[in-house]
Image (cartoon, grey):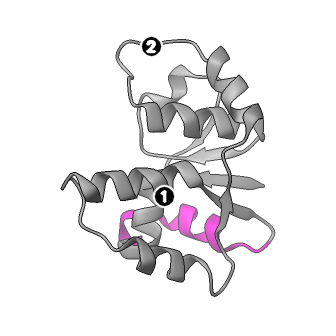
Amino acid sequence: MKLLLDTHTLLWVLGEPERLRIETRQILSDHANTVFVSAVSLWEIVVKCRVGKLRVNIGAILSRMAPAGSIAVLALLPRHLMALSRLPFHPQHRDPFDHLIIAQAITDDMMLVTADQRAPLYPVQVMVP
């Protein structure tokens, strides 16, 4: 199974794993599954740090992802932007970072691991972390 971590899920995996359900931790640690984080999530983290909404070290996040290679980075590609352009618009869900991550999950047939209760508004497979 291919899993795409939403931004908050990545932060929980790396810093607060107790916030994840036991079943989710087991699925994420199963080497039969491939775990990704979007470059969009990393961008979101940097943006939120720059404006004071988040206090984490992006270098530490990247170094924690890299050694084991347990979380791969998913680049933002033209096919993802095309999928984004076709997503339905929901006025109650206006977060552009979420929209891009959802488009990536749909395009690349990934399970989105998110606590975002608005994600099911879109045709994306969702796993609650």
Residue 67 placement: quadrant: bottom right
Quarter of the figure that contains the N terminus: bottom right
Q: Is residue 64 left or right of residue 57?
A: right
At mark 2, the secondary structure is loop
103 vs 28: above or below: above
Q: Which mark is residue 90?
A: 2
Q: Which mark is residue 54?
A: none
At which x and y percent is residue 73? Answer: 65, 62
Asked which quadrant contains residue 77, the reply is top right
| Image coordinates for residue 59, horizontal then vertical, percent | 44, 77
Res 129 visible: no
For discs 2 and 1, the disc positioned in front in the rendered view: 1
Q: Amino acid at mark 1?
A: Leu
In the rendered view, does 114 fall on the left or right side of 111? left
Which range is magenta?
Answer: 17-31
Disc 2 residue type? Answer: His
Q: Position of residue 48 (x, y in %)?
A: 30, 52
Q: Is residue 19 magenta?
A: yes
Residue at 38% x, 23% y: name it.
94
| 110 is within the stretch colored magenta | no
What secondary structure do most residues of the magenta stretch adopt?
Answer: helix
Q: Which residue is mark 1?
A: 42
Q: Residues within 10 Å of mark 2 (few under 14, many from 20)?
A: few
- Residue 24, position in %: x, y? 55, 61
Above or below for 17 versus 91: below
Residue placed at 37% from the left, 74% from the top? 15
Q: Secondary structure at mark 1?
A: helix
CA distance for labels 2 and 1: 24 Å
Q: Residue at x 41, y 33 (%)?
A: 117
Judge whether 87 appears above or below 69 on screen.
Answer: above
Residue at (68, 52) in percent of width and height: 75
Mark 2 and mark 1 lie on one chain; the one further toward the N terminus is 1
